[in-house]
Image: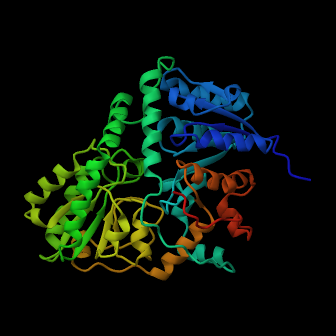
Amino acid sequence: MAPSHATRVFLFLQGPHGPFFDQLGRMLRAAGARTWRVGFNRGDEIFWSDRAGYIAHVDPPEDWAPRAARLMDEKGVTDLVLYGDTRPIHAVAIAAARARGITVHVFEEGYLRPYWITYERGGANGHSRIMEMSVAQMRQALEGLDLDLPDAPARWGDMRQHVFYGALYHFFVFVLNRAYAGFRTHRALSVGQEFRLYLRRLALMPLHWLDRSLATWRVKTGGFPYHLALLQLEHDASFRDHGPFDRMEQFLSVLIEGFARGAPAHHHLVFKAHPLEDGRTPLRADIHRIARAHGVGGRVHYLRGGKLARLLNDARSAVTVNSTAAQQALWRGLPLKAFGQAVYLKPEFVSDQPLEAFFQNPTRPDSRAYRDYRHFLLETSQITGSFYSARGRRQLLRQVVDMMLSPEDPYEALQAGRPAPRQHLRLVT
């Protein structure tokens, strides 16, 4: 007889932009579970089709903590589902869930982007269980398993869909949010400013492509050795909550000064922007200003996104705060320097050299250790698929629903010798 999930009650909070959480809830209900969704704005509401299971929170943010606790008790919640674990409304709900023994399911962008997403229980990024696990423990869990590891893909698979759903979500919040008088965004910019940035990015995509192509061509044909700096979004939770810098400008200053002091005089430094960088931070101007101040203006370059693999293939090293793109550098055996907390921050493959010494003579990672680490991720928290493209969501739902309904989280299942059936790579464009 098939197992019954009638006793499971899933409470959804905010998810990725678009219909993924709605489709996930529909699949959980098909399995016999009950679902509820708390919406904090019109965007949350529109992307949830089950009207009977929707709960609007229209009060100020300070009223959310007691209401979250009441909802969990009144609805008999057994599972909490959210995207990211650091935004204030999620952190408050996680604390209430833990006090009640409720399972916390956390979705995030993939640690091995772009053709995987991350699914963990309890926390992600700097709060992930991986932070406390050694490579030796991972190897022990992998004993007896074999996997032909797929290459790290060269490009973000669904960036256009990502930008589209972001713009649509912020449009709904900007134009139709009157009923949610207490809504406050967890970011520094207003919803209207966010919406205008999304529109601007969509409109300027052709010009950005031309600018990026020319800048990449200059680097690729320059004939100089270069180090690659992997930038993040300044408002991203990983940079903001799991790194040592308050602003991107601080990281740029530290990095360029270390390069000026330590790198050989014929080496260059290339900054690659995040694929979703929208111009709210004046990266190009800050980089060129700081580089001129340190006398290296002619040796520092800025690229507006683009394909990472082409740049990594010829780079001498990579530097980041804690970008997941660093995993592609490690996959290629490149020396890596990271400043923040990250799931890949293991002594076997991330350099602990001072920055000047790293630019002078960077130490290479233990590629065998990294392959074992990556194998462990692919058997546990990394699921093939995507939040934003239709094909990617279908592929993701085929795997993640059973993982959520399992009594064991992915790490426990692997350590017990019961890894979930996985699709390790099918391109999801």
The residue drawn where x is 12% and y is 53% is 289
**Relative image position of residue 151 (x, y in whole percent):** 49, 73
Q: Is residue 346 left or right of residue 193?
A: right
Q: Is residue 96 left or right of residue 73?
A: left
**Relative image position of residue 125 (x, y in whole percent):** 49, 55
Q: Quadrant of residue 382?
A: bottom right
Tally the marks: 0
The residue drawn where x is 53% and y is 40% is 18
Relative to 186, residue 85 above or below: below
Q: Is residue 297 left or right of residue 254?
A: left
Q: Of all residues shown, which one is farthest toward the right? A: 1
Q: Is residue 9 left or right of residue 127?
A: right
In the foreground, 51 or 378: 51
What colour-coding does the image apply?
Answer: rainbow
Q: Is residue 122 visible?
A: no
Relative to 78, residue 110 above or below: below
Q: Quadrant of residue 210?
A: bottom left
Q: Is residue 88 visible?
A: yes
**Relative image position of residue 76 (x, y in whole percent):** 75, 33
Relative to 194, residue 62 above or below: above
**Relative image position of residue 349 (x, y in whole percent):** 42, 75
In the foreground, 110 or 429: 429
In the foreground, 155 or 191: 155
